[in-house]
Amino acid sequence: MRVRGQPMRSIWLESDGRTVGIIDQTRLPHAFETLQLRTLEEAAHVIRSMRVRGAPLIGATAAYGLCLALLEDASDGALERAFTVLRATRPTAVNLLWALNEMRQMLAPLPSSERVAAAWRRAAEICDEDVAINRAIGEHGLKLLEAAWERKGRQGRLDVLTHCNAGWLATVDWGTALAPVYLAHDAGIPVHVWVDETRPRNQGASLTAWELGQHGVPHTVIADNVGGHLMQHGQVDLCIVGTDRTTSRGDVANKIGTYLKALAAKDNGVPFYVALPSPTIDWTLEDGVRDIPIEQRDGRELSEMTGRTASGEIVTVRVTPEDSAVANYGFDVTPARLVTALVTERGVCPASTEGLLSLFPERRAHR
Ligand code: MRU
């Protein structure tokens, strides 16, 4: 995608071949700043502190984190230690474990002298694969947006609601939920996006709004509680969100608040789509509500808010009483029955075991 007109990805290898560049997403939308990662600890820290976030980007950063660890020590012990450190950074997004497993499976049999070069190669491939996957999700999702636009008689504008940030900032490029939106916009469909602010960390208000703006896609930021009202009044043609982990039967973990939007969509007959790359599918789990571990994060994400003052200073202020307890759940699970369809790189399918297996038949052998 483009930042101020310049093409860029959300993560890259610097020209020295041993430093990883990222965008510091905690500074957006107020400041565009990049960071250079040189060690395993720095990679783990940027994931933990959400300087990078979004399931696919967390996976890509973890893959590069292993490369940085091996630069210092390429022994079996160091590989295992780095795996453990990175694995513990964020519990819900399954792409993290997927990327770490991909790297370890490939690296473990190699002599330590060959591991560093092989690790850089595989991390770069994981990034390239993510870009290709998201582009394919975009093309499949575009057909759904085109169909919705046709159903609307090609009148007015196409109103899409999204939650959190599942755009290019959450992936290496394109995004998952936003890839079809970008393609629809580029194809001339007058798409407009309702952007849920996504409390407590405001990924919608800060990140989705920023990246849609960079691409020139019309959008409006709304408080998280507005979507149901808009749907009741026919102002949402479809919802599309990303996911951090989707079970084999199509239950979907995504940013807290997604479930409520899916309920409102069901009640109002609004299609609710979930876009996901295959590394987000956790084939080992079926019942997402019971079995997906939900991250509980630092309460200050809720009790405090950060923004820019009129004078341009970025400040953090407290919004709750000093002595009130807060509970900060990061994600929730939307049961498959509320999901109209899943959009993957292989196509669109019902959110069900059979639906997913129809697109990923090779998984039948594992059942
Ligand atoms: O806590 P975050 O910001 O990492 O959560 C991100 C989301 O919930 C996204 O919607 C999800 O990762 C899908 S991203 C393509």
Image (tube, rainbow, N blue to C red):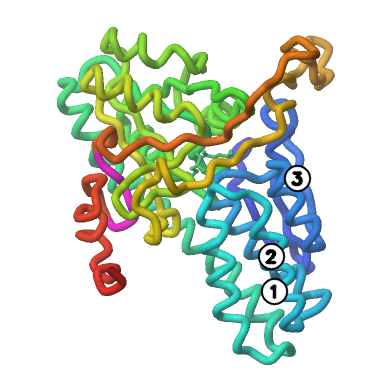
**Given the image, on which type of amino acid does mark 3 rest?**
Thr
Mark 2, ligand 1, within 8 Å: the answer is no
Residue at 37%, 60% in the rendered image: 283
Q: Position of residue 263 (x, y in %)?
A: 32, 24
Query: What residue does disc 1 label?
Result: 80
Main secondary structure found in the magenta portion:
strand
Instruction: Write down the quadrant of residue 162 in the picture.
Output: top left
- Vertical position of residue 340 compared to residue 57: above or below: above
Q: Are marks 2 and 1 in contact (CB under 8 Å)?
A: yes
Q: CA distance from mark 3 to mark 1?
A: 29 Å
Q: Give the foreground label among 3 and 1.
A: 1
Query: What residue does disc 2 label?
Result: 84
| Residue 342 drawn in magenta | yes
- Vertical position of residue 216 compared to residue 313: above or below: below
Q: Position of residue 63 (x, y in %)?
A: 63, 65
Q: Secondary structure at mark 3?
A: strand
Q: CA distance from mark 2 to mark 3?
A: 26 Å
**Given the image, on which type of amino acid does mark 1 rest?**
Glu
How packed mark 2 is, by other alpha carbons closer than 10 Å (few <14, some 14-19, many 20 or more), is: few
In the picture, which quadrant includes the C terminus?
Answer: bottom left
* Start-end of magenta stretch: 341-346
Residue 189 or 44: which is nearer the viewer? 44
Query: What residue does disc 3 label?
Result: 34
Residue at 76%, 76% in the rendered image: 78
